[in-house]
Structure formats: structure tokens, C-alpha cells
Image (cartoon, rainbow, N blue to C red):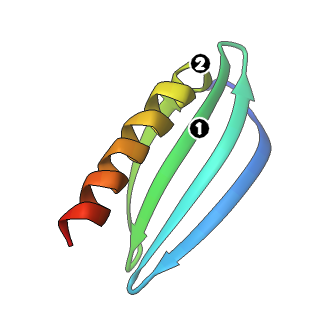
Amino acid sequence: MVQSDLLHTEKILADRKTFFLDLKENARGMVVKITEDVGGNRDTIMVPAELLGDFIAALTDIKATADNHG
């Protein structure tokens, strides 16, 4: 198992869901681990830190569309 260090964490509460965003660093580099917890059931994705700009830009575009749609 690869050892990793937690550098930063954020928690977002939404109804029955909790989202955890953890910036971690390991031997392969930095990643953001995004975990959704719904009643103890967890799903996780890992986003390499070097893709955060693209990831945030895509989410910003999606938010703009959602804001203009509702």
C-alpha cells in the first residue's frame, strides 16, 4: 500500500450526502480524493492535481449552464 499524506481537507454537507475533498500527496504526486458518503455508502474518485485547473473550468462551465437553465 502506498503511504500518503493529507495536505488539506474540505467537507460539504448537502441533505443526506456528505462530500469530502482531500488533497493528498504520495510517491506518485498530489491528488484530490473526492468522496461522497450517503448513509455510510461511499464512492470515491481521484483527480490528479495537475488536472485541477481543467476540472474546475469544466465545473464552472457546468455551473454557468445550470444557473442559466433554472
Find disc 1 in the rendering and name its residue.
Answer: 32
| Residue 20 pos. (x, y %) | 57, 60
In-image side of 70 versus 57 (left or right): left
Q: Residue 22, image x and y in percent?
A: 65, 48
Q: Position of residue 30 (x, y in %)?
A: 68, 24
Q: Secondary structure at mark 2?
A: helix
Mark 2 crowd level (few <14, some 14–19, many ≥20, 10 Å Cα): few
| Residue type indicated by callout 2 | Glu
Spatial distance from mark 2 to mark 1, Cα to Cα? 10 Å
In this view, the residue in front, 30 or 68, is: 68
Q: Is residue 42 left or right of residue 53?
A: left
What quarter of the picture does the N terminus occupy? top right
Q: Which quarter of the image is occupied by the C terminus?
A: bottom left
Q: Which of 14/53 is in front?
A: 53
Give the residue type at disc 1.
Answer: Val
| Residue at the outermost left position | 69
Does 57 sit above or below residue 18? above
Q: Is residue 67 left or right of residue 14?
A: left
- Number of marks drawn: 2
Residue drawn at the location 26% of the way across and 53% of the way down: 65
Q: Is residue 52 above or below residue 22?
A: above
Residue identified by numbered label 2: 50
- Classify residue 11 by image quadrant: bottom right
